[in-house]
Amino acid sequence: MSELKVVFCTDGIFPHQVGGMQRHSRLLLESLSALDVDLTVIHPHEGVQVFNDELQIREFAIKAIDKKKNYLKESKAYSKRVYDVLKELHENTIIYNQGFAVWYGIEEFSERVITNPHGLEPFQAITRQDRLKSVPFQLVFKKIFKKSRLTVSLGGHLTTILMTILPQDKITILPNAVNEKEGHSFKKRPESQEKICLFFLARFAKNKGIHILMKAIEELNTEGYQDKLVFKLGGTGPLFARYKEESRPDNVALLGFVSDEELIQLYKEADVFVFPTLFEGMPTVVLEAMSNYLPIIVSDTGATGELVARENGFIIEPDNVASLKAAILEYLDLSAEEKDQMSNNSFVKCMDNFTWEATARKHLDVFNAIYKELTVVANKN
């Protein structure tokens, strides 16, 4: 059994709870289980064994958050239940905190807590109303950050945000990831290609920029590009019914919920992935598109600049229809060879830098560094 012991504290594990952080918990733990580390996870799935026995991940299930009640109050109560388990574990166990899971009593573990806040959404609110709603969440996060040994940034603008709160030596950059894929051939685009297919996949909500995309489509069609551009929009959400009920041009398909099987085919049919989000962490949906050889058009927010450069796509200004249109038209004007090169660059960049195997090893390096610090302190005492 490894001397390095790590306990993951999370409010849910995919698929028992759906969300980016919950999926991150599962995939990172599964990847770390192949390395030299003794893993424990505290989660809210009572009566369920989340991980297979062969992964050798010890599980502690506790009472879940009541989503019908105040989220922050429930999160603090949940963190108290997490605290009660942590008190029983070895004093040199490293604690990996997802979001608010380690909050109550965090000062007792400060020297061994790594906090991953993921997208830092409370610090990226755009409207005045959203900024006001975010204040309590910001205050809690700042307390947790300052009491943690390290806080995780996914990179890019998220690091800049954290550096306004923490010294640089309390920040570590650990990106999101996708499962590794072997290279495969992608469709070659004929020189005479008359249409390109742009694929969007996200919640139909304002923060994902769906209104920006719809406005760009409207203007591009008015300007004479309707016969050259096809838009396939996947996902549901608060704005989906509105757009479904409205009349829309023939070159726009609203797909609704997309199954995994349908998604595979959509990636094959698409030429480029478009994601004009208003704020973000390091969106897994962009990484998935890259792993399927798609060039990317994405807003410059969160850590998207770590994923996309001119070699594999276009970074656009958030909340800017003109910037989105310009990127689409620039892609349209590329030669078939240039489009193929951009596709290949996306795949290679993703596989070289953002696989779960690579990210797990980066985490392991951080865990070992903290364990070494704890060992030195213990020997002095």
Image: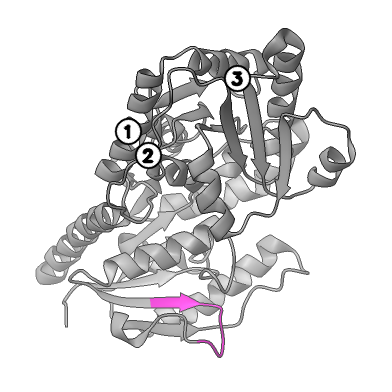
Q: Which residue is mark 1?
A: 344
Q: Report whether 114 appears left or right of 237.
A: left
Asked if residue 114 shows in the view, the reply is yes
Q: Position of residue 4 (x, y in %)?
A: 20, 72
User: SS of the residue at dot 1?
Assistant: helix
Q: Amino acid at mark 1?
A: Asn
Within-10-Å neighbours for mark 3: few <14, some 14–19, many 20+: many
Q: What type is the residue that disc 2 sits on?
A: Phe
Above or below — where is 55 with respect to 123?
below
Position above or below: 36 against 245: below
Q: Nearer the viewer, mark 1 or mark 3?
A: 1
Nearest the viewer among 143 and 123 is 123
Q: Are marks 2 and 1 in contact (CB under 8 Å)?
A: yes
User: Would residue 92 appear left or right of 13 to someone viewing this image?
Assistant: left
Q: Residue at x 43, y 27 (%)?
A: 189
Tell me which segment is drawn in magenta: 41-48
Give the prevailing secondary structure in the magenta stretch: loop
- Dots 2, 3 in contact, CB < 8 A: no
The dot on residue 186 is: 2
**What is the spatial separation of the Cα atoms under label 1 and label 3, in whole angstroms?**
22 Å
Q: Position of residue 89 (x, y in %)?
A: 34, 82
Q: In 3D space, how far apart are the residues under numbered discs 2 and 3 (Cα atoms)?
A: 25 Å
Q: Secondary structure at mark 3?
A: helix
Residue beneath the point at 54% across and 61% down: 100
Residue closest to the eye, 161 or 245? 245
Find the distance from the CA under tag 2 to the CA under tag 1: 8 Å
Residue at the extreme top of the image, as rendered:
223
Q: Which mark is residue 324?
A: 3
**Mark nearer the viewer, 2 or 1:** 2
Colour scheme of this structure image?
A: one colour
- Residue 226 picture location, percent across and down: 70, 19
